[in-house]
Structures are given as C-alpha cells and as structure tokens.
Amino acid sequence: MSFDEEWAELRAEAAAKQTATMQLNSFQAGDGPSGAKEKVKITGAELRRRAGKADIVRGDSRDADNKTMTETEQVGPSLKGFASRSAFEVFVKRWNAQN
C-alpha cells in the first residue's frame, strides 16, 4: 500500500469517527463482571452500614462547603474598585440563601 493510499484510508477513518452521533454502551445478558445469574442480596445490616457512610459523606460535604464559602466570602472585599466585586457578593448571598 502506498503512502497516498494509506493516508487516504486514515483520513476516511478519522472523518467517519467525527460524525455527530451518540452511542450508548450496553451489556448483553450474561456479560459483565457479575453475569446475569447473580441476584442482588440486600440486608438490613448492609443498608444500615451504608447509611452510616452517607452521614459521614454528608458531614464531609458540609465541612468542605463551609471552608470554601469562608474563602469565597473574602474575595469580594479584596476586589475593591473592580466591577466584578458585586458579582461575588451576589454569589455569596444566593449561595447562603439556598441552605
């Protein structure tokens, strides 16, 4: 195969891949790591264990939000004389209003 033929083939493949389409991944029955034969078994103990982890994640998210907003609230005052200062003040006000 000549360089020109190979180049034309590569360009055709690249053009075919650039079409605007959507492709969904899927598994056929029996495919995947667990296969279709296994059943999901959920116990009360498992639900309680996972609920406890959800409480930890909720607390961590709250703490991260509080720390971030503490820092963000300092941005507005530091922009004295800039037009964007009011945008930070509006953001902080609206963010705090949603809680």
Image (cartoon, rainbow, N blue to C red):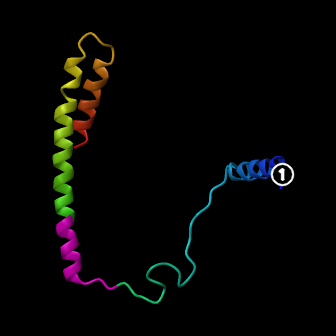
Q: Name the residue under label 1.
A: 2
Q: Where is residue 96 in the image (x, y as percent from the top left)?
A: 21, 37
Q: Which secondary structure class fits the magenta region best? A: helix
Look at the image and give the residue range highlighted in magenta: 41-53
Residue name at image x 31 percent, y 23 percent:
87
- The image shows residue 46 at horizontal and vertical percentages of 23, 79
The N terminus lies in which quarter of the figure? bottom right
**In this view, 45 is above or below 3:** below
Residue 76 in the magenta stretch? The answer is no
Near mark 1 (Cα within 10 A), the count class, few <14, some 14-19 or many ≥20, is: few
Of the 4 image quadrants, the one containing the C terminus is: top left
Q: Which of 98 and 40 is in front in this view?
A: 40
Extreme residue in the front direction: 2
Count of numbered badges drawn on the protein: 1
Residue 14 position, x and y percent, is 71, 50
Give the image location of residue 17, x and y in percent: 69, 52
Q: Is residue 42 magenta?
A: yes
Q: Residue at x 75, y 47 (%)?
A: 11
Q: In this view, does 30 lie to the left or right of 20?
A: left
Task: Identify the residue at the far bottom of this view.
Answer: 37
Tag 1, which secondary structure? loop
Q: What residue type is labelled 1?
A: Ser
Q: In the rendered view, would you say 56 is above or below 68?
A: below
- Residue at image position (32%, 86%) is 41
Most foreground residue, 83 or 25 = 25
Give the residue displayed 23% in from the left and 13% down from the top: 80
Q: Residue furthest top?
A: 81
Q: Which quadrant of the figure has residue 95? A: top left
